[in-house]
């Protein structure tokens, strides 16, 4: 990913926060012929006792993608954070042109299939717990234990061990303070939740 210096984000906690808030990511692999393959998956973003980042997920067993893990090639998970159109009319200085502000994280590493039923079930339980949080009657796999265990034969769970994180937070850092404030105000006038989230992220970075 091309990352100009003023848009580069290196702070691990900020990168992990974005990944956890936008955990439905795109997993990209390359096969032996050099052809890319992409799958869209909800990930669990975890850090172990040694500080290493792990991304856990599962996919349908008929998908050919997981078979490429055995080749020990690097894979890429792309986490897309808030993003939105920026109108040149929001700036205080002229001339200006339209652009797009956004935040994204690329996680590089190698993926390994999880073989034991207990490991697979842990991924399913933790994923359900994450997205059932706040539900008045949270569902968990134990409520349909036999059915879930039958379905487990049709999925492949894996652990993507992250070796490198790249963060690009394009938030008008190359503009003046007045222009940045104009962009924030323009986004806050929008109706899209993503615009409001983007504006909040920009505000959090202001001195």
Image: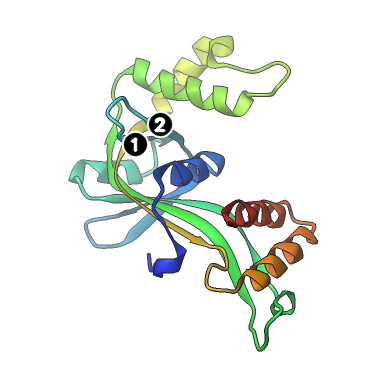
The mark nearer the N terminus, 1 or 2, is: 2
Return the x and y of residue 149 as percentages of the image width and height: 45, 16
198 or 71: nearer the eye?
A: 198
Q: Which residue is mark 1?
A: 53
153 or 124: nearer the eye?
A: 124
- Which image quadrant is residue 205 in? bottom right
- 32 with respect to 205 (left or right): left
Instruction: Sort mark 1 into few (<14), some (14-19) or many (20+) by Cα contacts within 10 Å.
Output: many
Q: Using the rendered image of the protein, determine whether residue 41 is visible from the camera's viewpoint.
A: no
Q: Secondary structure at mark 1?
A: strand
Q: Using the rendered image of the protein, determine whether residue 156 is visible from the camera's viewpoint.
A: yes
Return the x and y of residue 75 as percentages of the image width and height: 30, 50
Q: Which mark is residue 35?
A: none
Return the x and y of residue 71 as percentages of the image width and height: 19, 46
Vertical relation: 106 (above or below) 158: below
- Which image quadrant is residue 159 in? top left
Q: Secondary structure at mark 2?
A: strand
Q: Which residue is mark 2?
A: 46
Q: Residue at x 75, y 66 (%)?
A: 186
Query: In which quadrant of the rendered image does the N terminus lie?
Result: bottom left
Q: Residue at x 35, y 35 (%)?
A: 54
């Amino acid at each position: 990913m091309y990352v100009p210096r003023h848009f580069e984000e290196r702070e691990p906690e900020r990168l992990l926060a974005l990944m956890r808030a936008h955990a439905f990511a795109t997993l990209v692999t390359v096969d032996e012929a050099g052809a890319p393959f992409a799958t869209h998956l909800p990930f669990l973003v975890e850090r172990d006792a040694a500080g290493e980042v792990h991304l856990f997920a599962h996919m349908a067993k008929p998908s050919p993608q997981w078979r490429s893990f055995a080749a020990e090639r690097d894979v890429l998970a792309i986490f897309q954070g808030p993003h939105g159109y920026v109108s040149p009319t929001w700036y205080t200085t002229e001339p200006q042109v339209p652009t797009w502000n956004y935040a994204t994280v690329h996680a590089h590493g190698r993926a390994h299939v999880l073989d034991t039923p207990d490991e697979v079930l842990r991924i399913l339980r933790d994923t359900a717990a994450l997205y059932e949080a706040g539900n008045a009657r949270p569902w968990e796999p134990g409520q349909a234990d036999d059915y879930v265990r039958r379905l487990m034969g049709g999925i492949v769970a894996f652990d993507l061990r992250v070796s490198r994180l790249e963060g690009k937070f394009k938030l008008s850092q190359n503009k003046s303070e007045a222009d940045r404030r104009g962009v924030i105000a323009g986004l806050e006038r929008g109706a899209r939740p993503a615009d409001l989230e983007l504006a909040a992220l920009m505000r959090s970075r202001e001195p």
